[in-house]
Image (cartoon, helix red, strand yellow):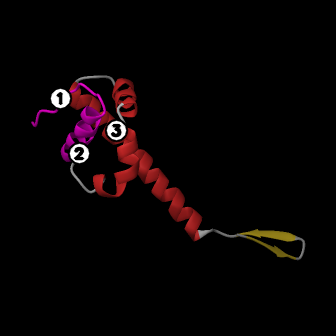
Amino acid sequence: MLAMSGKNLIFGRNKYRDEMANEETNKLKYTIALVAEFAKKYGIAEKQAYNYMQRFKGTDYLSSFYDVLHTQSFEDAIESMSIICQRNGGKLIYHSA
């Protein structure tokens, strides 16, 4: 928010904008953590995990269902992501721990 007071500009905080930025930051941090855990689960590099998830629609699924996925354990989220990727042509097979 920007308000004019004489010749001085007053900058205020925009609560909505701050909340949106915080939500985006949380989504980004969760995505990074999930990719790292996915990579560890399958014994591949994080870059390979991200590319795999992107190629086989896992990142689309994550984007669409973040609100649900981030409430699950990483193990459950990885299982869900694996199933989505398999349905879209991915060849990695999920095995529970």
Q: Which mark is nearer the camera, 2 or 3? A: 3
Q: Which residue: 89% across, 76% down? A: 6
Q: Counting residues from the N terminus, which is met first, the one under dot 2 or under dot 1?
A: 2
Vertical order, 17 against 62 (above or below): below
Q: Which residue is mark 1?
A: 93
Query: Where on the picture, by quarter, is residue 60?
Result: top left
Q: Counting residues from the N terminus, which is met first, the one under dot 3 or under dot 1?
A: 3
Could you classify mark 3 by the number of other residues whose Cα lies within 10 Å: few (under 14), some (14-19), or many (20 or more)? Answer: many
Q: Counting residues from the N terminus, which is met first, the one under dot 2 or under dot 3?
A: 3
Magenta residues, as a range?
74-97
Give the left or right position of residue 50, taking residue 23 as reference. left
Q: Where does the image place residue 31, in percent across and percent down from the top left?
A: 38, 43
Say which amino acid is labelled 1: Ile
Helix, strand or loop for disc 2: helix
Q: Where does the image place residue 58, in percent across and percent down from the top left?
A: 34, 38
| Residue 17 on the magenta segment | no
* Relative depth, front residue between 2 and 89: 89
Residue 30 visible here: no
Say which amino acid is labelled 2: Phe
Say which amino acid is labelled 3: Gly
Q: Which residue: 47% across, 51% down? A: 25
The disc placed on residue 17 is none
Vertical order, 85 against 7 (above or below): above
Could you classify mark 1 by the number of other residues whose Cα lies within 10 Å: few (under 14), some (14-19), or many (20 or more)? Answer: few
Q: Which residue is mark 3?
A: 58
Q: Where does the image place residue 51, in percent across and percent down from the top left?
A: 39, 27
Q: Which mark is nearer the camera, 2 or 1? A: 1
Q: Which residue is mark 2?
A: 74
Helix, strand or loop for disc 3: helix
Alpha-carbon distance for marks 2 and 3? Answer: 14 Å
Vertical order, 90 against 73 (above or below): above
